[in-house]
Image (tube, rainbow, N blue to C red):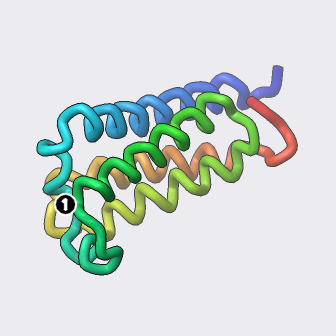
Amino acid sequence: MRAFALPVIVLRTGLGLVFAYAAVGALIQAEVWVDYLPDFLRQLLGIHRYAFLSVFAMFELVLAAWLFWGGYLRWSAGLAFVVLIGITAANLDLLDVVFRDLGLATAALALFVLSREDKQA
């Protein structure tokens, strides 16, 4: 067992749970989550915000499953980092709520650094 195996498993599980929770929450109670979508995204994409939320929730479920699986971990951790930084940057007006995403982004960055592309944790 590699020295970093347990921390990598903990980070993968924690991040996977966060993405899965957000995705399931958005699919079950879209009205609670839809207001967190920035207006510029809706205008940029030209689709209804509930439709975008559903697509994004499905993306988050895929990302959660990828993190749980652990294959190509460097890629999934890097993508998780980019998504979390993007959510924070797009919602600076809601920083009192999304500031936690900075900590999660840091966890994703740590997972990226600890992972090796050719290994599974």
Q: Quadrant of the N terminus?
A: top right
> Please, is residue 31 above or below residue 98 in the view?
above
Residue 9 image point, x, y percent: 63, 26
Residue at 50% of width from left, 44% of height from top?
Answer: 107
Kind of residue at disc 1: Leu
Q: Which image quarter: residue 18?
A: top left
> Please, is residue 42 above or below residue 32 in the view?
below
Residue 87 image point, x, y percent: 34, 60
Residue 55 image point, x, y percent: 40, 52
68 left or right, relative to 92 = right
Q: Which image quarter: residue 47?
A: bottom left
Closer-to-camera residue (46/92): 46
Q: Which residue is mark 1?
A: 95
Q: Residues within 10 Å of mark 1 (few under 14, many from 20)?
A: some
> Please, is residue 65 above or below residue 60 in the view?
above
Residue at 29% of width from left, 37% of height from top?
Answer: 27
20 left or right, relative to 79 = left
Residue 56 image point, x, y percent: 39, 52
> Please, is residue 92 above or below residue 13 in the view?
below
Q: Secondary structure at mark 1?
A: helix
**Outermost residue toward the top in this view:** 1
**Outermost residue toward the right in this view:** 118
Residue at 48% of width from left, 48% of height from top?
Answer: 59
Residue at 23% of width from left, 54% of height from top?
Answer: 50
- Count the labels in the image: 1
15 left or right, relative to 87 = right
Q: Quadrant of the C terminus?
A: top right
